[in-house]
Image (cartoon, rainbow, N blue to C red):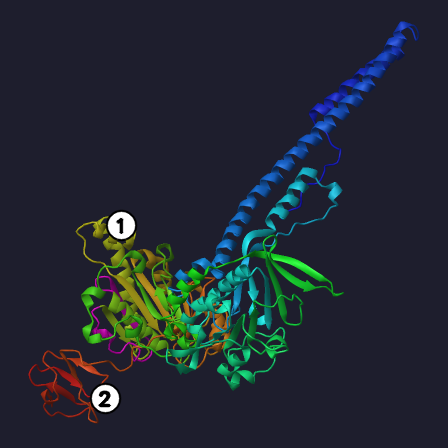
């Protein structure tokens, strides 16, 4: 923030000040002339002239003082108004930051009374042992520092600053340096024991709030909850029997899984087993380990021997919450808290000389036994499943496109439902993979003005990174979810033709152009065809009503205008780097598509194994989304997605990064489409293979498929390039040997 204005020096002047100085000087000059040229140098005239000289001097002095003081006040007032206006603008910005900080804090540390609703959402058990907020539990609400740092610049002593502005700045910093009513959290892995003293009802209410957060946000596989209770504590914690965190993993009794509850600490240790007893001691400053479950003990009336290890050093990955110990004697690794009516939640500690110090932390949270029991019953039917698997498995698993699109059986695919008109936000938007959390990663090729990531993009992937499979996945995902009246494809493969093999049978495919490296004449024809399509769309939009873009054309068609469908054209060029190396002038067509494609509904995706910045320099401004699979070098990764992360990807195909904009980079695992299919779709026949019947290769047939219906065609001389074909007897459908 800027410093307050300085007090101006008394200097300078204006027209009024000059006039107030010139008039007395002129009067004095006239008097002096009369004095020297007058007929007499004595008498009344002399006294009159002397008086006039004195009056002129006094007038000059008064005028100078008045004008200087007025200018200084006006300057100070103007600078003060400007600075107060400056503070008002920053006040709005800081208040917006305060609101965002409160929203984020309540999302991260929710109110214990609202945990019953969180337990019924996907946020249940969202904190894992590898997360930084693992076992960070809210204990109450208090004042927190503002997340935005306010730094005033001080270059002058405070005596030289304008007082009102300097005071306003101090009040501004004092008012917004802290935010009230913010969650205050305890990091349990940092302590071996937490002692809570005070009124037993308020202490148990605080403990119930801590336990409610623990069981709502942490999975029972990674956090165990053990109760050492007796007397009144048995009835106070009876509701915890419904929690899956209190159930033993291997021991069972007549009621099912044994509960981790006993009347003494020795019984609890025996119930947990030898593996728990052999854990090493707690080390201050250590974090929770993912190798073994974290155990939280609740001591409320239970028996614990004097000098027991749980109260004398503790275990690794274990914390004891003691509700019975009234001794507030802080020790190494022990947190002492006290709940009082006057000060709220107080931390008791010792200074360097051993004197007791009390620090107010927050207004303590609380949860009634009825609300805690309701939360426990909500969580009781849940167990570990797909939603609680480690996030790293989402990027290591393989899954097909049908699973991603929630189509379990391709034979039962309802194209009428899939091709139904989609709302604008869902148009040209399909999932292509999953992220670290297993959530679908969607690619939206619409322009950014419509909420998409397009209209044009680039895909780079080294050999074996899954580039061709990802292109097929994108094409088939769009074909399944969009009709041919909405979307068409132009698929170009400069080298070979395996990338888009079989995709020419889609009704969406306008053309599949392959092996351009061997057919130089086809390159010119393709360039002319794409250029002609751009010109045709321009003339069509102009002829039917002078529409400026395809979006206006589609809106008019949706409102009932008699217009023919004009589908969006998605042009995918594989090995475009090789194409530009052999035909440099092709860059002009790509630039033309990048410039006009947004309004004409023509989208471009360029894919290659390598990238050279010099060849796509003109296209950089037109490429919106960028996909980087595993690259050959860190420099290529940095050229595509801005960071070298793609070079560090694992060698398994399908792993990549999607950069949607300058600030969003998503790690994903792509689905595949080249795997085996499910049951035989009706009306399809298998290709004949001389070795065996193939389950992954199908040919459309108009009759019911049977093995006996396939027979060799009339003998003819075989060609080395093309194997003999087979025909179906009833309908004469033929297919080459697979």
Q: Residues within 10 Å of mark 1 (few under 14, many from 20)?
A: some
Write down the quadrant of residue 490 in the picture.
bottom left
Which residue extends farthest right? Answer: 42
Q: Position of residue 419 (x, y in %)?
A: 22, 64
Horizontally, residue 279 falls left or right of residue 609, namely right
Asked if residue 506 lies in the magenta stretch, the reply is yes
Q: Position of residue 440 (x, y in %)?
A: 36, 68
Horizontally, residue 140 falls left or right of residue 463, namely right
Q: Find disc 2 in the rendering and name its residue.
A: 721
Horizontally, residue 388 falls left or right of residue 506, namely right
User: Do callouts 1 and 2 mark residues in contact (Cβ within 8 Å)?
Assistant: no
Tag 2 or tag 1, which sits nearer the N-term? 1
* Eye-nearest disc, 1 or 2: 1
Q: Position of residue 533 (x, y in %)?
A: 26, 62
Write down the quadrant of residue 526 in the picture.
bottom left
Q: Which residues are magenta?
A: 482-507
What element does badge 1 sit on?
Answer: loop
Kindly tell me whether residue 70 is visible in this rendering: yes
Give the camera-side residue of 229 and 517.
229
Give the camera-side residue of 481 and 378.
378
Q: Position of residue 343 (x, y in %)?
A: 61, 54
Give the camera-side residue of 432 and 138.
138
Kindly tell me whether residue 21 is visible in this rendering: no
Q: Residue 429, relative to residue 693: is it above or below?
A: above
Q: Which mark is residue 547?
A: 1
The residues tagged by marks 1 and 2 sit, at their Cα atoms, a distance apart of 50 Å
Give the camera-side residue of 48 and 226.
226
């Amino acid at each position: 923030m800027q410093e307050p204005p300085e007090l101006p020096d008394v200097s300078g002047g204006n027209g009024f000040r000059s006039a107030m100085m010139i008039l007395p000087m002129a009067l004095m000059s006239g008097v002096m002339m009369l004095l020297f040229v007058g007929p007499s140098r004595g008498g009344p005239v002399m006294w009159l002239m002397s008086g006039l000289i004195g009056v002129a001097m006094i007038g000059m002095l008064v005028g100078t003082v008045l004008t200087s003081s007025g200018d200084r006040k006006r300057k100070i007032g103007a600078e003060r108004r400007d600075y107060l206006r400056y503070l008002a603008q920053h006040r709005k910005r800081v208040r917006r930051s305060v609101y965002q900080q409160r929203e984020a804090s309540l999302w991260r540390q929710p109110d214990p009374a609202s945990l019953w609703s969180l337990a019924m959402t996907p946020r249940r058990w969202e904190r894992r042992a590898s997360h930084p907020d693992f076992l960070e539990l809210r204990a109450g609400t208090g004042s927190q520092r503002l997340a935005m740092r306010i730094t005033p610049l001080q270059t002058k002593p405070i005596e030289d600053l304008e007082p009102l502005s300097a005071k306003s700045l101090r009040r501004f910093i004092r008012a917004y340096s802290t935010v009230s009513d913010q969650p205050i959290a305890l990091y349990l892995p940092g302590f071996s024991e937490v002692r809570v003293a005070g009124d037993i009802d308020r202490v148990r209410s605080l403990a119930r709030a801590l336990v409610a957060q623990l069981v709502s946000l942490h999975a029972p596989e990674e956090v165990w909850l053990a109760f050492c209770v007796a007397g009144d504590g048995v009835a106070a914690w009876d509701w915890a029997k419904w929690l899956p965190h209190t159930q033993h993993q291997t021991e069972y009794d007549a009621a099912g899984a044994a509960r981790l509850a006993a009347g003494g600490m020795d019984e609890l240790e025996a119930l947990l087993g030898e593996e728990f007893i052999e854990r090493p001691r707690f080390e201050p400053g250590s974090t929770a380990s993912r190798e073994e479950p974290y155990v939280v003990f609740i001591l409320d009336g239970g028996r614990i021997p004097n000098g027991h290890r749980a109260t004398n050093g503790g275990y690794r990955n274990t914390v004891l919450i003691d509700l019975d110990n009234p001794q507030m004697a802080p020790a190494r690794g022990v947190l002492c808290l006290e709940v009082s009516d006057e000060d709220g939640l107080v931390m008791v500690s010792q200074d360097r000389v051993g004197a007791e110090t009390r620090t107010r932390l927050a207004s303590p949270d609380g949860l009634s036994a009825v609300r805690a029991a309701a939360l426990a019953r909500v969580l009781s039917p849940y167990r570990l499943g797909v939603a609680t698997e480690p996030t790293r498995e989402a990027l290591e698993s393989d899954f097909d496109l049908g699973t991603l699109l929630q189509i379990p059986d391709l034979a039962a695919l309802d194209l009428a439902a899939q091709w139904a008109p989609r709302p604008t936000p869902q148009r040209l938007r399909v999932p292509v993979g999953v992220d670290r959390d297993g959530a679908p990663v969607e690619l939206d090729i619409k322009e950014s003005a419509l909420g998409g990531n397009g209209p044009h993009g680039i895909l780079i992937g080294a050999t074996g990174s899954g580039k061709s499979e990802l292109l097929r996945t994108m094409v088939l995902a769009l074909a399944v979810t969009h009709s041919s009246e909405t979307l068409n494809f132009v698929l170009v493969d400069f080298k070979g033709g395996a990338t888009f093999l079989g995709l020419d049978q889609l009704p969406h495919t306008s053309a599949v152009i392959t092996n351009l490296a061997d057919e130089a004449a086809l390159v010119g024809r393709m360039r002319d065809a794409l250029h002609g399509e751009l010109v045709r769309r321009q003339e069509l939009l102009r002829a039917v009503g002078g529409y400026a873009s395809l979006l206006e054309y589609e809106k008019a068609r949706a409102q009932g205008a008699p217009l023919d469908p004009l589908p969006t054209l998605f042009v995918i060029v594989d090995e475009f780097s090789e194409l530009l190396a052999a035909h440099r002038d092709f860059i002009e067509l790509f630039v033309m598509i990048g410039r006009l494609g947004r309004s004409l509904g023509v989208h471009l995706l360029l894919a290659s194994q390598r990238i050279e910045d010099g060849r796509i320099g003109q296209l950089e401004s037109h490429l919106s989304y960028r996909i980087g699979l595993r690259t050959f070098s860190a420099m290529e990764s940095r050229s595509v997605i801005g960071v070298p992360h793609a070079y560090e990807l694992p060698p398994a195909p399908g792993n990549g990064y999607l950069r949607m904009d300058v600030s969003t980079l998503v790690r994903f695992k792509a689905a595949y489409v080249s795997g085996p299919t499910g049951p035989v779709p009706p009306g399809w026949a298998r290709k004949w293979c001389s070795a065996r019947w193939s389950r992954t290769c199908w040919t459309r047939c108009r009759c019911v498929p049977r093995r006996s219906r396939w027979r060799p065609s009339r003998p003819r001389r075989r060609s080395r390039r093309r194997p003999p074909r087979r025909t179906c007897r009833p309908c004469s459908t033929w297919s080459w040997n697979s």
